[in-house]
Image (tube, coloured by chain):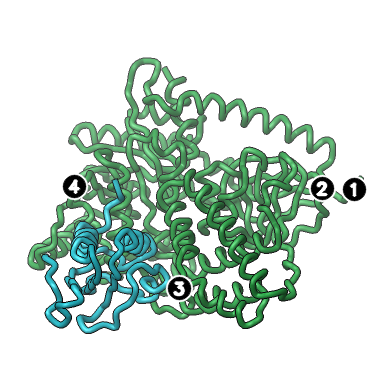
Amino acid sequence: MPAEALRLRGHAAAPGLAAGPLIRLRDKPTAARSASSPETERAALLRAMEQAASDLARLLDAQTSEAAAILEFQLALLEDADLTSAAFAEIDAGAPADHAWRHALDAQSADYASAEDGYFRARSADLVDLRDRVLRALSGDAGVDLRLPAGAILVADDLPPSRFLEIDWRRSVGVALIFGSASSHVAMLARARGVPMVVGLGDIPAVDGTLALLDAERGEIEIAPSAARLAEWRERTAALTARREEEQRHLAGPAITASGRRIHTMINIQGLIDLESDASAHADGVGLVRTEFLFQQQGALPDEAVQYRVYREILDWAGARPVTIRTLDAGGDKPIPGVTIDGEANPFLGVRGLRLSLRRRGLFKTQLRALARAGSSGHLKVMLPMVTTPAELREARGLLDEVLAELASEGLPARRPALGIMVEVPAAALAIDRFDADFYSIGSNDLVQYLTACDRGNGELVALADPLNPAVLELIERTVAHGRRMGVPVSLCGDMAADPRCVPALLDCGLEELSVAPPALGLLKAAITRHG
Amino acid sequence: MTAFPDPASPDRKAVTASVRLRHEAGLHARPAVKLTKLAKKFSAKVSVAMLPDGPWIDAKSIVKVMATKTPHDALLHFRAEGEDAEAAVLALVALVERDFPDAG
């Protein structure tokens, strides 16, 4: 046995299963060059810059939107004499090429790092990414993918986005990061590409070549598994592969049941990058935009302009398709420093969702302004989370009225979006006929949690927290029936729609619109197609 | 917005114009890259400033343009000198006015 079996727990950042030898991506501390003549050093730096530029240009060809913006910026920097002249001047003064380049880029990166604006601060990571790319080229490192054995799981401390983009993901099967975060840019890229990724695993004590099982469904890695575990794993992988193949077959077409009902299948997104997932193009619209991602960036809360730009980009992407944007749903398991209330004894039953927005009116009105302005073209719907009573809906609508009047007096183009509610608090679901909303969207995760009184994160209660509990289905059915009577559209966004066991029951409840994370869209369409 | 010869230096054929930056987030990487790429298409010396009297910076340099960290709603001033100066200024103003559309 090469190593003792070991299981490490991290966080799933992009779903999937992968088995293969572990290979650590090492940025070898590139042996410092000793300066030869300035001419030689100049030529070496120029060659490295050219290689970096051609690598970036090649990568850029394959990208869209957000990933492209990162690469375009780096490429433009590389072509700018104002960036490179400092390095060449240092070379002329006798410095080796690597030292001169590092020095020039670090100066730029420090300038960004000290910016007041969070956006410009974050650009310092692009400078570091570019610095390292040229340094690798200088040391003759032709790029990682060429040396990677096929089928490997890549291990790294963290992974800069451009490095991720240059790896051939048809050859490598997964990523295990020692640090990293599920909300990082690279995690979003991995989800969009369908590369299984687990982050935050801590030290991974295994030598290169050790076999490992990367479980990016549960957020774990198992090193040097036993033969019995391997056999189990093969079965699980085979089942998953078969399922994925079926999903792929159904992904591109419309979702129609065997009896001919056309179901609208939408995607839930938590960042612009989710729109780049292959599956997203085949969605009938965006059923849920989780705006929390905007509020979890480092530094300041997003102002109206930043929010407007992001909402606009999503609406532009969707074209004529509907986009449902949920107002900030902070609190519960989604604390936001400086916004949510610390130290609540039971945050899931505390000041969260709309309850929080109605207490943070400045923040809420900023979001409503950005939404009303963004909605001046396209098909925008705005959804309020954690609504308990009709009075809360009326209060939110009053604030929307205020915001629209303000925008009109400022001469800013805006339009009133449809205003709907999430149905996830049992009191709201039971009294749904009291809610005069433009649409209802059932949030099945919280509805199940509150109805069964089971914490969804508690592994001991998995069996009790059953979404197919008749009480859950009855409430869903009643909500759908009420919506149909009143002509109010009803949809469902939540894990139930991504669970093939639950989809038939949801269709039987009369739902015609279901929304899931992009990687689950194929699964949802396949389940609908199988249904009678 | 029309471009006009700069009365301060009529013999050098400098053309100036100013335009309000409407891009919601300010002069971020993507609009800045578009701006410098467009400026580079002209042989004229093209400069941009945040104040009418400068300091003028090279509009063909992404490093310098990004270093201004220009916020939303700033007034951008362009100045160009050289053969195609007027065309350059008009094109840049149009780019900003049209809010940096993707090149067709």
The x, y position of residue A232, in whole percent, is 75, 33
Quick check: A109 above or below A399?
below
The x, y position of residue A273, in whole percent, is 44, 50
The answer as to whether the residues below labels 1 and 2 share one chain is yes
Mark 2 lies on a secondary structure that is: loop
Picture residue at 50% right of the left edge, 64% below the top: A78
Cα separation, mark 3 vs mark 1, equals: 53 Å
Q: Colour of chain B?
A: cyan
Label at residue A2: 1
Cα separation, mark 4 vs mark 2, equals: 60 Å
Mark 4 vs mark 2: which is more N-terminal? Answer: 2
Mark 1 vs mark 2: which is more N-terminal? Answer: 1
Please state which amino acid type lies under the numbered disc 2.
Thr
Label at residue A82: 3
Which tag is nearer the camera, tag 1 or tag 4?
A: 1
The x, y position of residue B23, in whole percent, is 26, 63
Picture residue at 40% right of the left edge, 59% below the top: A292
Q: Output the chain of dot 4.
A: A
Picture residue at 22% right of the left edge, 59% below the top: B91
Which tag is nearer the camera, tag 3 or tag 1?
A: 3
> In this figure, which residue is indicated by the disc labeled 2?
A210
Please state which amino acid type lies under the numbered disc 3.
Asp
Cα separation, mark 3 vs mark 2, equals: 46 Å
